[in-house]
Image: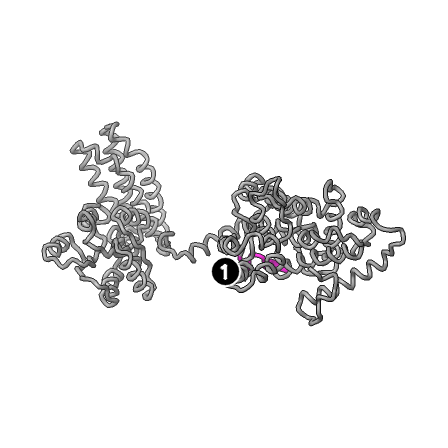
Amino acid sequence: MANILLLDDNEVAGKAMQGVLARGRHGCIVATKADEAWRHLRESVVIDLVFLELKLPGNAGMIFLQKLRDDCFLKVLPVAVYTGVADINQVKKAVALKAQNYLIKPYTETAIFGEIAKVSANPWRNLHFEEVKSFCAQLGLSLDALATLRRNLMGRLDECAKTFPRWTVRRENATVFEEIDAVSADAEAAGVWGVVDYFRELRGHAESAHWDAFKHCADSLEYASRLIFCQLNPSYTPDCLRSDEEKARIKEAAERSRWSGADVDVSGPVVARAEIEQQLAALPGCPVVDTVAAAFLMAADGKATSIDPAMERAANDPGLSAQVLVAANKGTDAENTVTDDPRAAVNRLGVIKLNALAKALPVVPERHLTVPPLTWADFWMFQIGVGKLSLFICDYLELSYLKANAYTAGLMHDIGLLLLVKLHPFALEPMVRYARARKVSLREAEKKYLGMTTREMGCAFAEGVGLPPVYRRVIQWVETPEAATEHVDLIAIVSLARHLCLHNRIGCCGDLPDGSPPPISQTSAWQLLQPRLFPSFELPKFEAGAHACCVELHQTLLGRTNRDLGRRRFLAA
């Protein structure tokens, strides 16, 4: 595999070249301007061959070729002219500048691969180095000893890049010649002839009092250091030659390692709370799992005969519910009614705004929520379960005035987990593992890794985007209903529904129930609800009904029943 640089300002030519080289599994960088091509050459080092279009504005193609031949290191870089200019004078100039070949467009695979074959046998970078085995044998060096000499030379060159430019104004001749000769001797001992040649040039400039030559020498010295690095690390591939997929894979591996390797008991949180708060404030909206976002976009594409499918999807997904409510209430003032029903929010937005919202949803890959025992399907079931159980409790306790918000409140009570997976997709797995190993709650693990909980993340986000107040308070106090100061009854109902879903294993929220569930009567949620009930209320009968509801709901969410759910009041959305 070779690494190719194409300098051509024609977009079609660039895509054509990339297509040809991809079939040969060669790397390719396309530059449309000479200065861009030069930057790639200096930064990447590992370019094996340049294909050059001469027909660039201002004769930039020929000027670029001349610049290469004037450079101490790049003067031996192979260049194949591949141009639309069939001019004998241009051919002569290119040949005089040692172009490897002069080809006329259009591209042909045979010609391109033929040029690559010429440079693959003996890469031009080897011309700057003595051959390793013969050099070691001649001087009695081991391979490791030679590698050490070359690494040390890299360090010397990096130091020179900092000090040599000063000689443009500080012309200390004795020091100049002493340092040039010392580094040149090191380069010769390491068999790096390209550096030896370059320092010979620098000495000539100093002898001629041409001090301006030192003004920009740092660029060449740093390039020489990178050249040695690439020779010592032949498998090195710079980012500019990696595909977007490969870059993403490398970045993902590094991020995953950062989280999984953290010892939070010793070093503290992996990210600071203030950083997370800034990231939350920068989010364009509530994250939605990619598969859900795709289905919603299909339902909201403006071509459907009814808006009902979009309403149904928005009303049954925590991220979508939050997103449509925020969008529908944006700009709402005291004179307008706040919409707290996701279906009504979809209707208020209308087809055009809904389609725009669907296209701009911030998405979370479903795979990032696959952290056994948690998966996206399990998390979704848990949220739906809490919403449905909240409705059942409202019906059973005859608190019908809370039904309008109960399902959506239960559905969205844990959106903080979606926010976490969007901002730091590889944080969840080590936190779940930490909680399991130490037998603590997931919330405690979150504090260890984040300095805050996903519940607090959900609260901060909900406040920032202006989610309706009733849902903001549920998110805030659902796990500590005794601390609630507003919407206490609804919070207690959702908290109780969450307790029932957790201990009846309807889906999964990341936490596992610890031992036998405490009786409903001992929960803080029930302590808040009990004063609202008649003295004749039979708690054992309610507990039996709640358990039966959980069994039926579990089977339904797993798709194992064909009953008409419309007849079941606890499943009525």
Magenta stretch in the rendered image: 365-372
In this image, 44 relative to 329: left or right? left
The residue beneath circle 1 is: 302
Q: Amino acid at mark 1?
A: Gly
* Screen quadrant of the C terminus: bottom right
In the depicted view, which residue is nearer to us: 265 or 569?
A: 569
In the depicted view, which residue is nearer to us: 390 or 214?
A: 390
Residue in the image at 20% along x and 34% along y: 206
Give the number of callouts. 1
In the depicted view, which residue is nearer to us: 312 or 14?
A: 312
In this image, 427 relative to 386: left or right? left
In this orientation, does residue 247 appear?
yes
Q: What percent of the width, then of the height, locates residue 76?
A: 21, 52
Q: Residue furthest bottom?
A: 562
Q: What percent of the width, then of the height, locates residue 339?
A: 62, 48
* Screen quadrant of the N terminus: bottom left
